[in-house]
């Protein structure tokens, strides 16, 4: 049979997981209590459909059926970036393919370190992916009450974090460092403005931080950032949500936290860890 899998569209969609429409089962993601969402918590997900020609699917090991095809552990497929066939979007989920290729490029848990990461190749993989296929949307949960949300996609065999960030209109991040990690950012929807700052000297008196550059990135653009290039903040100056894909390697910030900086004084504060708003397509309890 043909089964339509529907992603979260509104709070009301969460009240009825299994409905029948024209003889097709329509499933909305389970395990997301309605109480988790308020009027300010807006899942930035539009409808995504997949076709399965077998018996009606069910929930397997507590994982929403909509997540089938999203590889929690892509390495289990036994594929590499050199062997994945060049097939059309109807045969291959390009976002899943990107997850596989990034993980493969970073190697097993005993593989690459920060010193020998091939940033150019990782950036090439990010650039080759066309975000207009919208296959990233099952991960993109937004919340207007926050500057942005961090939604975990993959942990890269412990060598990286791959996140979808949803940026609320007119908001952004604080000025921050990256914990001596590489950061690649690809714009999936909208425009994002990156403002870079020089590191303040610890022995200097408090004074406003110095801006050393600013650039606005459009859809499908890719930016690279590391502490050697300074500090930065990312802002959504548009009137709608913006969405970006971020690869951090190694995952130092997730493990040890990072520093944020006061723009007016240069004073820094340590943030022990950055929490996820969702993981693998499911909202997390706060």
Image (cartoon, helix red, strand yellow):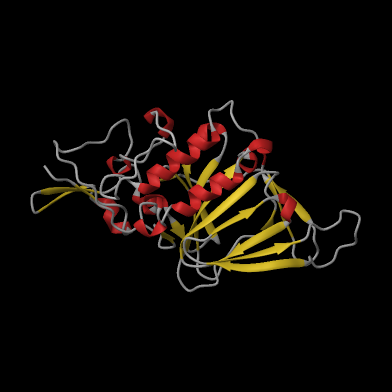
Residue 206, quarter of picture: bottom right
Q: Position of residue 250 (x, y in %)?
A: 62, 38
> In this orientation, which residue lies closer to the viewer: 38 or 116?
116
State the residue at coordinates (47%, 67%).
190
For the N terminus, which image quadrant? Answer: top left
The furthest residue to the bottom: 239
Residue shown at 43% from the left, 52% from the top = 129
Q: Is 256 or 184 nearer to us in this picture?
A: 184
Q: Number of labelled discs? A: 0
Tell whether 120 sits left or right of 80: right
Residue 187 in the image, given as x and y percentages of width and height = 49, 60
Q: Nearer the viewer, residue 36 or 133?
A: 133
Residue 126 on image: x %, y %: 49, 50
Does residue 197 appear to the left or right of 172 in the view shown?
A: right
Q: Name the foreground residue: 253 vs 29.
A: 253
Q: Left or right: 5 with respect to 262?
A: left
Give the farthest residue toward the top.
Answer: 110
The residue shown at (69%, 45%) is: 179
User: Can you see residue 137?
Assistant: yes
Do we see residue 275 in this rendering?
Answer: no
């Amino acid at each position: 049979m043909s089964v339509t899998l529907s992603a979260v569209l509104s709070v009301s969609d969460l009240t009825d997981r299994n409905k029948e429409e024209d003889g097709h089962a329509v499933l909305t993601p389970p395990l997301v209590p309605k109480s988790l969402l308020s009027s300010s918590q807006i899942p930035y997900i539009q409808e995504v459909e997949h076709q399965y020609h077998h018996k009606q699917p069910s929930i397997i090991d507590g994982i929403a059926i909509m997540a089938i095809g999203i590889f929690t552990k892509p390495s289990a497929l036994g594929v590499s970036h050199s062997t994945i066939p060049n097939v059309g979007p109807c045969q291959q989920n390009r976002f899943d393919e990107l997850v596989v290729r990034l993980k493969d490029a970073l190697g097993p848990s005993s593989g690459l370190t920060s010193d020998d990461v091939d940033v150019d190749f990782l950036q090439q993989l990010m650039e080759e992916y066309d975000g207009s296929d919208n296959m990233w949307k099952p991960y993109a949960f937004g919340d207007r009450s926050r500057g942005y949300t961090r939604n975990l996609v993959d942990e890269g065999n412990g060598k990286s974090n791959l996140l979808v960030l949803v940026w609320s209109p007119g908001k952004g991040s604080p000025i921050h460092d990256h914990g001596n990690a590489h950061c690649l950012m690809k714009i999936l929807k909208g425009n994002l403005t990156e403002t870079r700052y020089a590191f303040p000297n610890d022995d200097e008196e408090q004074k406003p931080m110095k801006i050393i550059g600013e650039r606005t990135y459009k859809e499908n653009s890719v930016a690279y950032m590391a502490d050697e290039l300074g500090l930065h903040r990312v802002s959504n100056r548009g009137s709608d949500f913006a969405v970006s894909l971020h690869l951090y390697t190694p995952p130092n910030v997730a493990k040890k936290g990072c520093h944020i900086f006061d723009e007016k004084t240069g004073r820094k504060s340590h943030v022990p860890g950055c929490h996820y708003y969702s993981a693998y397509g499911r909202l997390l309890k706060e």
